[in-house]
Amino acid sequence: MANCASCSAPLPPYADICDYCGSKHDTNFHGIHRYTVNRPLSDRICPHCNEHLQTINLKSAGKFFVERCEKCMGVFFDSGELPALLEKSVSHVYEINLKRIDTINQKNYKKNKTVRYIKCPVCHAFMQRTNFASRSGVIVDKCRDHGIWLDGGELLHLMEWKKSGGEMLHEQLRGGKENASINNRQKTQHENPSIKDKDFLSILWDACSGNSR
């Protein structure tokens, strides 16, 4: 377990703020990327703190800009930026370590965490809470039009998840579901050739209108 650089108190896994002295710890980017903070502040607003976000240049493969709250260490990614950053940051993963994935998720699990819907830093509409990927253990806040918000420490969690083969596991599970869906459709068409070339909506329409044939 890491210790706070200011008061030496133990820090919970992926903690970004010390519970004892309140010191901030940059768990998202420390030791992962070289970065600079651009000025002036962004016009985007932190959904938790209602403060203007910093613009961070991660200097990953040139310029890579994200927005971060200096107070709570949450990070906002424009659409497509989070998968791109994970792809650039974690590579050469060849196996799935289920035990490691479960350990990462257990360390990050907060038993009594209050579920709260927050607003997009760009359009200020409420965002959707959704699981980032299979067994990632991270619920992200997603704006359909503008991007994804991660609370402090969640980016590091996702990087550890990917290093442990989490993304490979997600692709396998998704591929299995797609194959099962295709197999079920083929089975249905084989058992009832009369509906081979119909889609679901046309079948439903025929059934409701009495035109089934």
Image (spheres, rainbow, N blue to C red):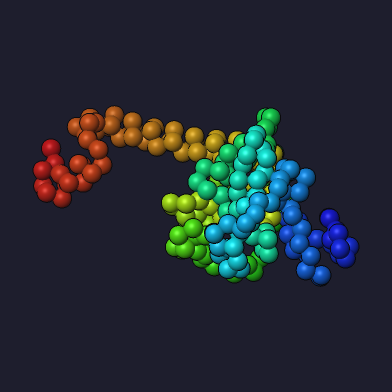
Seen at 44% across and 63% down, the residue is 125
User: Could you tell whether 31 is left or right of 116 in the image?
Assistant: right
Q: Residue at x 46, y 38 (%)?
A: 177
| Left or right: 179 as drawn, with respect to 5 | left
- Can residue 115 be seen here? no
**Residue 154 image position (x, y, % from top left):** 65, 53
Q: Position of residue 117 (x, y in %)?
A: 51, 65
Q: Identify the residue at image location x=26%, y=42%.
A: 200
The picture quadrant where one finds residue 96 is top right
Quadrant containing the N terminus in the rendered view: bottom right
Based on the displayed image, in which of its 4 quarters is residue 151 positioned?
A: bottom right
Residue 126 sits above or below residue 103 on the image: below
- The quarter holding residue 168 reads top right
**Residue under the point 58% across and 68% down:** 50
Going by the picture, which residue comes out furthest to the front? Answer: 40
Q: How many marks?
A: 0
| 112 w.r.t. 184: above or below | below
Q: Position of residue 103 (x, y in %)?
A: 72, 50
Front-lying residue, 136 or 8 = 8
Q: Looking at the rendering, in which quadrant would you find the C terminus?
A: top left
